[in-house]
Amino acid sequence: MDLAALYRYLPALERTLRAAYRRERRAAPASIRPYVDVNEEFTLRGGKRFRAILVLAGYHLATGKDPRPALPAAAALEHFQSWMLIHDDIIDHADTRRGGPAVHRSLAALHAREARIGSSEDYGVGMGITLGDLEEPFTVEALLAAPASPRARLNALAEYVRMTRLTAYGQALDIRNGILPPETVTEEDVLTVHRFKSAVYTVASPLKIGALLGGTSRARLTDIESVGIDLGIAFQLRDDVLGAGFDAGASGKSSNDLVEGKRTLLVVKAWQAGSETDRNRLARVLGNASASPEDVERAREVIRATGSLDYSERRIETLTARALRRLDRSRTIRASGKPLVREIADRLVRRSA
């Protein structure tokens, strides 16, 4: 089975997600139903569904069989993703997501249109946090719905708990890094955030949850964990490159990460290697939403000229190579599934969007 075969399950995944919201809408009080609709629209608005695909991949790696029984768990990861994105957009003061308004922005706009009492912005943020929280019971319910043995479901739930906790650790450290002077943030600080916030819930845990539901014991997941963490960090480093506006023509992304002040590896290494003039150029842009396009381009040039961009590319290659060596040597990942993992690796780190 390859990625193309896994993606053929997407229509069934969409139906599973839609059915969960429809069930909840019927059960919820009438006054709550419009808010369930907000969550449904946001989740079904789009997204790559890659975490869901990795749950299906993990199940197939464990069993060698059709991964359809893992569809409820794949849907669970999409509910979790909605939860994280809704809250992330509030933290980042983002206006848009998935081609539409961020949830808290759309709710604030509704409040303003209806001329309700109080602050529209406060309403949007408060309701956005709450509707993000509403996605957790959808997540747990979907995991419990997977047709697997009680032990397999408990193991998958335990991994979900671990994933949620580590993701929160990563988010806390990411916010902490953002308030520190750039010269005090180290490469290890950046990679720790990527390990907790991105690698676990983007790659390692989805694969593990699928494998656990397929009956794999926790003891046999060491290689999947290690491969998933290395590929997940490489994935986030690639996202940082795209998010700083490099390959913007191909990715459609801009320099948002720079003007948002994110302490990425690109920024940390450029700050360390740059001159005082270079640091001043970076400082004019970091966290400055009003930075001019010329200043942003000068900051990107600092990242290029100091070798920071090349350094991130080398780290991506090193992490990917280490993951693939571990995959090749693994005796716990079935040989027939290794080409699928290689294809996943290529999709994660060679992307331009």
Image (cartoon, rainbow, N blue to C red):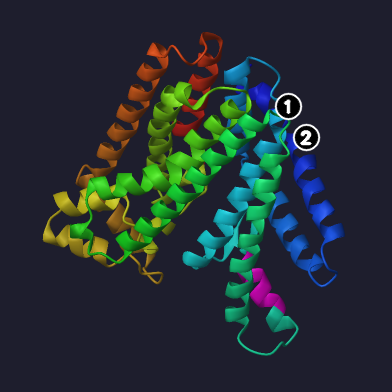
Question: Relative to 109, is 128 above or below?
Answer: above
Seen at 70% across and 43% down, the residue is 142
Which residue is outermost to the bottom? 117
Could you say which quadrant of the image residue 171 lies in? bottom left
Distance (Cα) linking label 2 and label 1? 9 Å
Evaluate whether residue 208 shows in this view.
yes
The x and y percentages for residue 57 are 60, 25
- For residue 181, the mark is none
Could you say which quadrant of the image residue 172 lies in? bottom left
Instruction: Say whether marks 2 and 1 touch (CB < 8 Å).
Output: yes
Viewer-nearest residue: 235 or 330: 330
Evaluate whether residue 351 shows in this view.
no
User: Tag 2: residue type?
Assistant: Ala
Q: What secondary structure prevails in the magenta region?
A: helix
Left or right: 310 in relation to 165 = left
Point out the frontmost of discs 2 and 1.
1
Residue, disc 2: 12
Answer few, some or many: residues within 10 Å of disc 2's Cα (few below 14, many 20 plus, some between 14 and 19): some
The x and y percentages for residue 116 are 71, 87
**Residues in magenta?**
103-110
User: Tag 1: residue type?
Assistant: Arg
Residue, disc 1: 68
Disc 1 element: helix
Seen at 62% across and 79% down, the residue is 123
- Residue 251 highlighted magenta (yes or no): no
Viewer-nearest residue: 325 or 237: 325
The x and y percentages for residue 23 are 83, 52
- Residue 105 highlighted magenta (yes or no): yes
Question: Relative to 284, is 303 above or below?
Answer: above
Seen at 45% across and 54% down, the residue is 168
Which residue is outermost to the top? 335
Left or right: 89 in relation to 176 = right
